[in-house]
Amino acid sequence: MASMAFGSNMDIHSGGIDLAFPHHDNELAQSEAYHGVQEWVNYFLHTGHLSIEGQKMSKSLKNFITIKEALRKYTARQLRLAFLTTAWDGPMDFKDDVMDEMKSLEEKICVWFSKAELIREKVTIGEIKSTSAETDPIVKKLAERFRDTKEAVHAGLTDNLNSRSAMTSISELINDLNKEFKATNISSTYPVLLEITKWITRMLGTFGFEPSTAEGRLGWAEDRDPFLPEIRKAVRYRDTLRAKAISKSGINEIDTLTSQLDTLLTSNSAEFAPYRQGIDNFTQAVSKLAKLNAPFADFLKECDRFRDETMLELGVSIDDTDFGIATIRFADASRLMAERDRKRAADAALAEQKAAEKQRRKEEEDRKAREKLEKGKVPPTEMFKTTEYSQWDAEVCIVGLLD
C-alpha cells in the first residue's frame, strides 16, 4: 500500500513486516532504476502480522475474516479500540479474548461519560454549585493525576506512536475518576472532573472516535444520540417517582407528573417507537397504581421493572446513584441482558445459600434445645454418674449437688 507520490518519488510506502525483505528491497531497486532517481521512497512503514486465534491470517490457509464479517460480531468502535491497544508495528492476535477486553474497555469509558453527563446536568440546573477548591486535597490529587496522565499520553505517542500506552494511561485515569464520583465531594471536584472528561473526549477524537454533538452529551458519538433527550425526560420522571415512593409521599403528585410527561414527549419517529411504547407502558402502569392508591412498594417495583426489563432490553442502561438521579447510557442489549441474568442468578444462589445457612442454624438450635430438654429429664442421682466408678452413694451424690 502506498501513500502520496510526488513526481517520481513517494513519501510513504507501507506494508507488512514480511514484505520488508526481499519484496520491498526489490521493488525499491527496480523503481529507482526505472525512474532514474536515487531515492524513490522517503519512508517505509512496516506493520506487524495479524493473526486469527493464534495463527497468521492467510488466504492460502483460509484463515481470514473480512471487515464485513467482523462488523457482524463487533462494533466499529470495538475494532478501533483493538487496533489502538496494539503496537502498529507489532503483531496482533485477533481473538475472542482480546475483543472481550475491548468490550469491557468500551463499557468502562461509556460508564464514565454517563456519570460526567449527570454531573453537568446537575450543574446546569443549579443543583451543584462550585465551592472553593484551592485547598481541597481531592481536587489537588485529581489535578496532579490529570497532569501525569497528559504527560504519559504525550510520552507514549512520541515513542513510535505507542497508542497502547496512551490508551492504558487514559483507562487508568478513568479508574481514578470513578473513585471520586461521590455526592459528598462533588461540589468541589466537578470542575476538574468535567475538564478531564472533555480532554478525554478530545483525545479519543484524535484517535478517530467522533465526539457527540447531542445536547447535554459528553464523550463519543452514539447512533442513538437523537433519542437521548426523550429518554432522559422519562428517566427523570422515574427518578422523581422513585424518590416519592421511597419517602412515602405524594401519590396525587405522581399522577400529575405522569400526565405532564405525556405532553413532554414529542418524538414520533419510527426508530423511537419501541422506546416510546416502553415509556407509555410504564406511565400507564404508574397511573393505574396511583388511581388504586397502591402501596409505595408497588411503585418501586414498577420503577425497577422499567430499569431492569423495559429499557435494558432496548439497550439503555439506567443506573441509580446517590445524586438522586440516574445515569443513562446506550449499550448492547444482549450484553446488558446477559449481565442482568448473571446477576440475578448470583443473587438467587446467594439467597439460597443464606436460606440454607439459616436453616442449618435453626436445626442446630433445635438440636441443642432437644439435648437440653432430654438432659433435664435425667434424675439428679444419675446425672453425673460415669463408668469411672463402679459404685455410687446416692446420699453423697445428692448432698454434693445441694452443696
Image: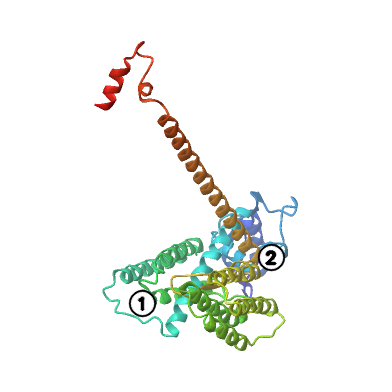
Mark 1: which amino acid? Answer: Ser
User: Which of the 4 image quarters holds residue 311?
Assistant: bottom right
375 or 224, which lies in front? 375
Question: What colouring style does the render use?
Answer: rainbow
Q: From the image, which quarter does the N terminus lie in? A: bottom right
Give the residue at mark 1: 187
Q: Earlier in the sequence, mark 2 or mark 1?
A: 2
* Observer-nearest of 90 and 145: 145
* Mark carried by residue 168: none
The image quarter containing residue 340 is bottom right
Q: Residue type at mark 2: give it.
A: Leu
Label 1 packing within 10 angstroms: few (<14), some (14-19), many (20+)? some
Q: Nearer the viewer, residue 371 or 1?
A: 371
The relative height of residue 349 versus residue 254 in the rendered view (above or below) is: above
The residues tagged by marks 2 and 1 sit, at their Cα atoms, a distance apart of: 42 Å
Q: Residue at x 52, y 44 (%)?
A: 359
Reading the image, the residue beneath label 2 is 71
- Furthest residue in direction top, as rendered: 390
Q: Point out the residue furthest to the left here.
A: 403
In this rendered view, identify the residue nearer to me: 312 or 172: 312
Q: Quadrant of residue 306?
A: bottom right
Residue at image coords 33%, 71%: 139
Q: Is residue 353 above or below residue 39?
A: above
Image point (37%, 17%), residue name? 386
Is the C terminus in the top left, top right, bottom left or bottom right quadrant? top left
